[in-house]
Amino acid sequence: MDSDTPPLIVDIDGTLTDETRAIDPRVMPVLREWPARVVIATGKAMPFPIALCEFLGIERTVVAENGGVVFVEATDELRFEGDHEAALAVGEAYRNLGHDLGFGQIDLANRWRETELVVSLDQPLEPLEELAAAQGLVVLDTGFAYHVTDPVVDKGTGLEAVCAELELEPAEFLAVGDSVNDAQMFDLAGEAVAVANADETARERADRVTDATYGDGFLEAVTPYRE
Ligand SMILES: O=C(O)COP(=O)(O)O
Ligand SMILES: [Mg+2]
């Protein structure tokens, strides 16, 4: 392992993708060849980052559902945290008010979710926030979905859990992301980089903001470590 290259924790949507959520193919060799640990940290359910790691051919080290799910292949660790029952109750109450989660009959956004619930951005936010608060949960707008999440977890607690397994320190990491759900991992990482399309929270909590957006922003963020 190259001792000059930090371990990397990286978000998916908005960071490794273009604006349509398609992976920018140019990020793939960077992740595959990164000489230190790579952690994929996402709001998506676990199958998505697991599949990304598998298809990249890298070890599966994953923070999913905004910290609700942590998987570390190297130590056989799978951890769930957060009140899934409460999140499901929010979804039911939201539907009872006549609203919809917004992902259609076959809801692939929630199908494999084990700790939180997501609602499409085209659905009303206010009633969702009220119902979430009544259950002690929060709503995160990642720019891609509303996540009804237990505030006991976030990508920062996920990073800490990964580090505890792998005898690493969060401060050793380079973190790259684009939204409010990346803020806590930004706070813990040694260096936090927001891509130019990042929301205000991510930009404020980052150490630097790239000039370029999306996958180009990620490539810019890691450039100092690839020369
Ligand atoms: O699924 C989302 O809403 C956001 O996913 P991300 O954390 O990978 O950007
Ligand atoms: Mg993102």
Image (cartoon, rainbow, N blue to C red):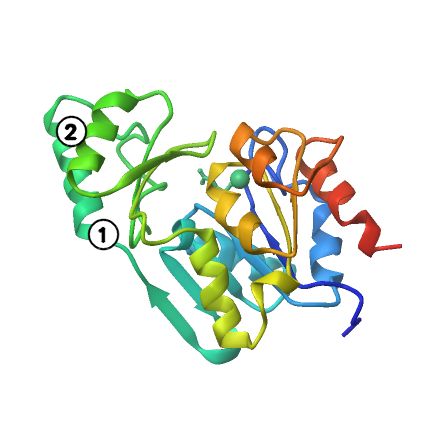
Residue 81 lies, in percent from the top left, at 30, 60
- Seen at 41% across and 49% down, the residue is 66
Q: Amino acid at mark 2?
A: Arg
Secondary structure beneath disc 2? helix
Residue 84 numbered mark, or none: 1
Q: Is residue 138 visible?
A: yes
In this rendered view, identify the residue nearer to me: 23 or 217: 217
Q: Amino acid at mark 1?
A: His
Residue 50 lies, in percent from the top left, at 49, 59
Judge whether 162 appears above or below 189 on screen: below
Q: Is residue 76 left or right of residue 152?
A: right
Residue 127 lies, in percent from the top left, at 21, 24
Mark 2 highlights which residue?
95
- Seen at 36% across and 67% down, the residue is 79
- Seen at 77% across and 64% down, the residue is 5
**Residue 146, picture quadrant:** top left
In this rendered view, identify the residue nearer to me: 21 or 163: 163
- Seen at 57% across and 48% down, the residue is 186
Judge whether 25 appears above or below 75 on screen: above
For the residues labelled 2 and 1, the Cα–Cα distance comes to: 17 Å
Q: Is residue 195 left or right of residue 30?
A: left
**Residue 100, picture quadrant:** top left
Residue 153 lies, in percent from the top left, at 36, 53
**Residue 29, picture quadrant:** bottom right
Q: For the N terminus, give its image quadrant.
A: bottom right
User: Mark 1: few, some, or many residues within 10 Å (few <14, many ≥20)?
Assistant: some
Secondary structure beneath disc 1? helix
Q: Work out whether mark 2 precedes mark 1 in sequence or the reverse, and give the earlier one.
A: 1
User: Mark 2: few, some, or many residues within 10 Å (few <14, many ≥20)?
Assistant: few
Mark 1 and mark 2 in contact (Cβ < 8 Å)?
Answer: no
The residue sitting at the right extreme is 227
